[in-house]
Image: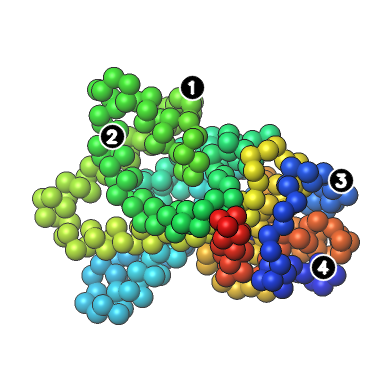
Amino acid sequence: MTTTMLTFDRRADERTTPPSRVPLSAITDDKAMLRAVVELTRDLNAPKPAIYWTDLLASAAVGYAGLVVAMTIGSVGWALVAAGVAILGLYRAGMFIHEVSHMKHSAVPGFRLGFNTVVGVPLLVPSFMYEGVHNLHHAKTRYGTAEDPEYLPLAHMKPWTLPLFLVSSILAPMALLFRYAVLTPLSLVVPGMRTLLVSRFSSLSINPQFRRRMPEGEVAAQWRWLEGACSVWAIGLIASVVAGVFPLHMFAIALGVASGVYVLNQVRTLVAHLWDNDGETMTVTAQYLDTVNVPPPALLPVLWAPVGLRYHALHHLLPSVPYHALNEAHRRLVATLAPDSPYHKSNYAGLPGLVARLVRSTMVRAR
């Protein structure tokens, strides 16, 4: 989501070479790479609870402190600085929803509850909106197809779809408030609305064709209390603003910070993959090559691709490896795999080149 330097370096190529026209569905698996990935990382699968808890709580503390300062300080300049800090802190804390969706919960006891209490409910992104959805993105037969909730062939679409993709995220906080404050209560009394709410408005997905199934058993029980907590929180927020308890200007600042979090995540999503699949089933190697690592020495990915997401391509090879071990896994693979290994081809220099590559691809196909 340390490259030493036996590697094929794509850092220059991404700025000068047009997007490949070789269909990803035609790429076969590189068995040597896949075998090395497994053998070199066997000892990295155990999550470290102290790292998880410290990172989550520290990130949330920084984010909420920045938000309080942004809402209360008199200086516009310092308020903007504080809002920036709040966005980065809350964004990092929110990205732990990705870890929650992958982890064995017995390995980090109580972490799902901690995430939802500290971030999920306050930001109206409870873990059920990602659990049970994100794993479909990792399914070998679903990735990059119409059944993938987290994939759109953006590189094959019109240029205007990219700004629309980003702008839509600005409205996410208002949409989530409406979902939990209005639609959730209505779904309890309006026939048919519950099914619609679950299938269409209960997933953090980007594929508009994705339809979610109704939860069952233990998942349904977890869903109910989390959705109820979000509904109470959303209604309470709106009521406090209407009653004048929560000043409107502070509420507007909070919404602005939340929008900043969702926009930043949407930018990251824009470059998380190359989005070059045409809907066909792909091999694991092809899926890897359609996904992006932004390893050191790049520094800014620490901010815009936090919690291991700078090693997103590697994560698709090792979805069970905790985020804090991905850097070591990457170091071992770079040092071991031959220069012509496909592994090196998904390592990119940074955000600007990736955005330019995607824009260039849409422009070429628009001709």
Question: What residue appears at the point 23 percent right and 58 percent down from the top-left corner?
Answer: 251
| Whether residue 136 is visible | yes
Q: Residues within 10 Å of mark 2 (few under 14, many from 20)?
A: some
Q: Residues within 10 Å of mark 1 (few under 14, many from 20)?
A: few
Q: What's the CA distance linking mark 4 and mark 2?
A: 52 Å
Q: What's the CA distance linking mark 2 and mark 1?
A: 23 Å
Mark 4 vs mark 1: in front? 4
Q: Which residue is mark 3?
A: 31
Where does residue 86 sit, x and y in percent of width and height?
Answer: 38, 66
Q: Which residue is mark 2?
A: 183
Q: Which residue is mark 4?
A: 7
Where does residue 233 sit, x and y in percent of width and height?
Answer: 28, 44
Mark 4 or mark 1, earlier in chain: 4
Is 220 on the left or on the right of 349, as rendered? Answer: left
| Numbered tag placed on residue 217 in the rendering | 1
4 and 3 marks in contact (CB < 8 Å): no
The quarter of the picture where the C terminus appears is bottom right
Is 240 on the left or on the right of 304, as rendered? Answer: left
Question: What residue appears at the point 41 percent right and 33 percent down from the top-left corner?
Answer: 200
